[in-house]
Image (cartoon, rainbow, N blue to C red):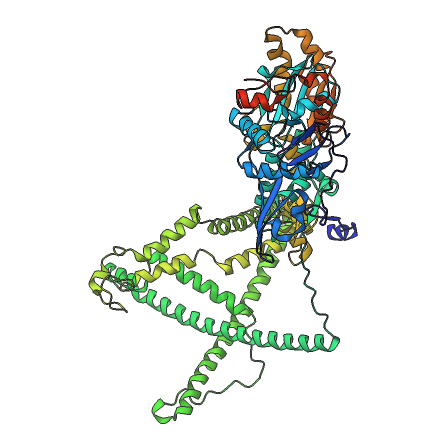
Amino acid sequence: MSSKQAEEELPPRPAYPIPDFGPTGKLEPYYGSYETGVPIAIDLGRSTTRFGLVKESDPNNVFPTLISRFKDRRVNKMVTLVGNEMFLDTISKSNIRSAFDGPMINNWDVIEKVLDYGFLHSGVSSQGRVDNPVVMNEVLATPLQQRAGMMELLFEGFEIPKVAFGTDCLFSYYQNGGSTGLVIGTGHDATHVIPVVDQKPVLSIAKRIDWGGRQATNYLMDFIGLKYPYFPTRITPFQMEKIKQDYCYVSKDYGTEVSNYLSLDNLEKNDIVLEAPFTEIIKHQKTEEELQIEAERKRDQIKKLHEQARERRLEKLVQKEADFTYYTNLKDRMKSMNKREQIDILRTEGFDDEADMNKYIGNLEKSLKKARNEDIGENTSDEPPSFPLIDVPDEQLTEEQIKEKRKQRLMKANHDARIRAKQEKELAQKEAEAAAEKDRKRRETDLSGWIAERREKLEKLTQNVKERKRLKEELTDRKSRAAQNRMKNIASLADEDRGSGRRKKAGNVTIDNDPNDTFGANDDDWAVYRDIARGEDDDAEEEEQQEILKIEEELLEFDPDFTVEDTLQRQYDWRNSLIHRFLRGPRNFDPEDQHQQHQIHINVERIRIPEIMFQPSIAGVDQAGIVELSEDTLLRRLPGETGFSGDDSNEMMKDVFVTGGQSLFQNFQERLETDLRAVLPVGSLLKVRRAQDPLLDAWRGMAKWSVSEHSKNSYISRQEYAEYGAEYMKENNMGWVKL
């Protein structure tokens, strides 16, 4: 069974739609059980905000931390949409903006709109005043300017009675009953490794990796952009985020898996095909009569093209024969000339030296033999054609007869060319038969030597083909050496000092009478065009291809060690192309298929993106991964801190807690545990666990903490803010400390 037949028998690969924005028409609900004085927990994330009164088990409202502000021309007013309501209108989608620049807030107006939107949907009914305490998350080690801006907005903008801050990953750890352990929070903008001892975070040795969900999405977006630079549809960051969440996973053994990921068998299982929406162009189904008329028209066009091509070949053949005769006679005349006269003749004809002229004549003779061996339309009539007007002087002919005489002269030249071509073909056929008989005897007497010669010749021809292909690819790159050399040849046309002085002798007479433009005064100028044109010899390339096919057929028949896999065509087969498998997966690509034109393949990216948390150097981040930071914290930094010992490290190993959006990657927990066991002492009681809900447990931890004994002395009241200013703060065990 051939590989093509095997591919046809495989079932079609499923193509999944590239996810779009959330469901349209979804309005954020309004909470109906609002109570004054009940704390409101706000998980103000860089991608998603979770809002709600702490008496509930889950946040009342979950929406993107984005707004869209645009002018609605239908009512001639500015419109501001927040959260999921941005996706109700196509105009609002193109005006989405965030309040964050990395992990920091750079647009407080957006934050004010987001908080106002959240308070409104939480049921706050007082005009511009929120009579509820607020518990809010913040980035670990938030700068004073950011914290002061948030406190000013809450106390002065919304007049809240009191506020407390904390870190989301520590709130999540609190919600999951943690006491002593190593907290790994994989956030939207960074990943934190925080040791916690007796519910108190040791922030002096906490570490941050500048890699989070946002960077992973941007990296995947850049990766896909480089992979498919001419993809017809723009993929938005929202869509790329969904692709990352749905199809990426953590490899349990990255080195082994990535080395085999692009094999055909593995791609059949793990390559994901995503298709962008498009309007399919349905071709008109023609009737049988229309198809017949079109086929007849094509046959007439092909016949006409063949006639035109034959006439062009005849004209070229006549011209080449005239040139060959001229240069051959010129070469014979030069034998009787002295050296100075020969040099003048060569320069006049545009040759560098005699070797250049001999090379040109040789190529011309080779081209003539090839043209004569082709089918140039031999005259099958038994009677030779007559050309009565050729020998009649023009003075004795009318204008119509002169035109007919020119036509007969061309017809006679064509007839003579056919005769010579026929003779050349018969001679070439006899020579080919003699060479074939000699080759057959050679093969029968010394098969191993014959095979070695054929393989050596095939190797040389194959290298020529590869070198020509490489040269063509380099010429498409203007920075390559081949392209630069070609440009130098072209630029030499404008060099006024080029040549050996004949231009000066010719004077400054040019076609446009420009004294500064002396190009063409010397015949050597036009030789540059011939040098450039010789860079690509289509005739030689076609001959090499035919010769390669002939040798391969012979080796397939007589060499038992030569298989189809060794042929040049199979070497360029898409199955053997790593680039094809990377771009188009384990199937052939049809550029005419509209569906395949709008498809992208996700393969190596599925494991490469999550792997960056373990190896940040993959993305050019000069930092250690989470395993290395965890090992350093457990074995070196924590025991070296004052007041801590190795017992604290051992207790911490028993509870390695992971939370955050990136911990949802498949195999994340198993990979982290495997890698930590490899670096920790033998026999360590290691336990890695993930938050019950890595996305919502931070908000639930805020709600739980806000009504506990731990929070009573952690709130800052509006009176304290007014008295002490924004610099005043109260430390707590949720990461709000002075640094």
Q: Position of residue 99 (x, y in %)?
A: 57, 37
Position in image of residue 619 (x %, y %): 57, 32
Q: Nearer the viewer, residue 685 or 9?
A: 685
688 vs 452: above or below: above
Q: Nearer the viewer, residue 71 or 543?
A: 71
Image quarter of residue 104? top right
The reply to whether residue 307 is visible in this rendering is yes
Q: How many marks?
A: 0
The residue located at (43%, 64%) in the rendering is 364
Q: Is residue 180 left or right of residue 396?
A: right
Q: Is residue 420 visible?
A: no
Q: Is residue 425 above or below residue 606?
A: below
- Which picture quadrant has residue 158? top right
Residue 215 horizontal side relative to residue 337, left or right = right
Residue 543, located in which quarter of the rendered image? Answer: bottom right
Q: Is residue 388 above or below residue 435?
A: below
**Residue 10 image offset from top left, x and y in percent:** 78, 49
Q: Camera-side residue: 427 or 498?
A: 498
Quadrant containing the C terminus is: top right
Location of residue 138 in the rendering, given as x and y in whole percent from the top left corner: 61, 27
- Tell me which residue sits at (53%, 75%) in the image: 308
Q: Nearer the viewer, residue 255 or 700?
A: 700
